[in-house]
Image (tube, rainbow, N blue to C red):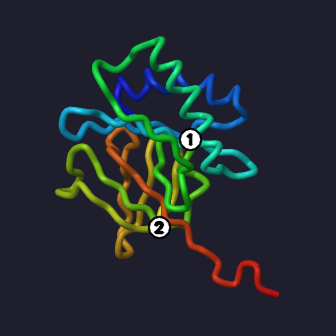
Amino acid sequence: MSGKEALLTQLLRPTVEDMGFSLWGIELISPGRRPTVRLYIEADAGVTVDDCARVSHQVSGVLDVEDPINGEYTLEVSSPGVDRLLFHADHYAPYVGELLDVRLRLPIEGRRRFKGTLGSADGESIVIVVDDEPFSLPLRSIDRARAFPRLDINQGKN
């Protein structure tokens, strides 16, 4: 997480939580001249489009007052979805055994991208198994990680 994303998380988490949601993560994307601030929110009952609009309205007010981003920006609020980005150390453990796509800041063993099964997560590093070969990746080296949980195709059937 970049310093700016950490600042935004610290600034916006109380507002999101006061509205009954948890802040899953924040992405700061800077394509071209106008950055995008993307918030991912969660709730036990799920997240609706109306929930995203309400959170966007409240968060926009906080950002207008605090002004942590120079110039114009786009604000997006979304649920993390099924194939979700993993932002924090505690996000990994529930996905042990699931498929992950991990991109590193700098190469490890000549690779920057690893797509495989998450073997373990201990808060400092993860082990991802690619083609039966385990790779230990320090969390501080991960630029972006996305989990792709297996969906039970029989779920909901009698």
Residue pictured at 36% horizontal, 24% vertical: 4
Q: Quadrant of the N terminus?
A: top left
Q: Is residue 59 left or right of residue 135?
A: right
Residue pictured at 60% horizontal, 34% vertical: 55
Q: Quadrant of the C terminus?
A: bottom right
Residue pictured at 45% horizontal, 24% vertical: 8
Can you tell which of label 1 and label 2 is closer to the viewer? 1
Q: What residue occupies the far bottom of the structure in this picture?
A: 158
Q: Measured from the top left, where is residue 29 in percent x and y?
A: 31, 39
Crowd class of label 1 (few under 14; some 14 to 19; many from 20; radius 10 Å): many
Residue pictured at 38% horizontal, 53% vertical: 136
In this figure, which residue is indicated by the disc labeled 1? 24
Vertical placement of 94 versus 11: above or below?
below
SS for tag 1?
A: strand
Q: Amino acid at mark 2?
A: Leu
Q: Measured from the top left, where is residue 17 in percent x and y?
A: 67, 29
Between 148 and 48, the one nearer to me in the picture: 48
Q: Is residue 142 left or right of residue 112?
A: right
Q: Measured from the top left, where is residue 113 in percent x and y?
A: 27, 59
Vertical placement of 100 versus 138: above or below?
below
Between 76 and 138, the one nearer to me in the picture: 76
Among the two numbered marks 1 and 2 on one chain, the one whose residue lies closer to the N terminus: 1
Residue 125 - label = none
Residues at discs 1 and 2 in contact (Cβ within 8 Å):
no
In this figure, which residue is indicated by the disc labeled 2? 99
Q: What residue occupies the far right of the structure in this picture?
A: 158
Q: Amino acid at mark 1?
A: Trp
Residue 153 visible in this rendered orientation of the protein: yes
Q: Quadrant of residue 52?
A: top right
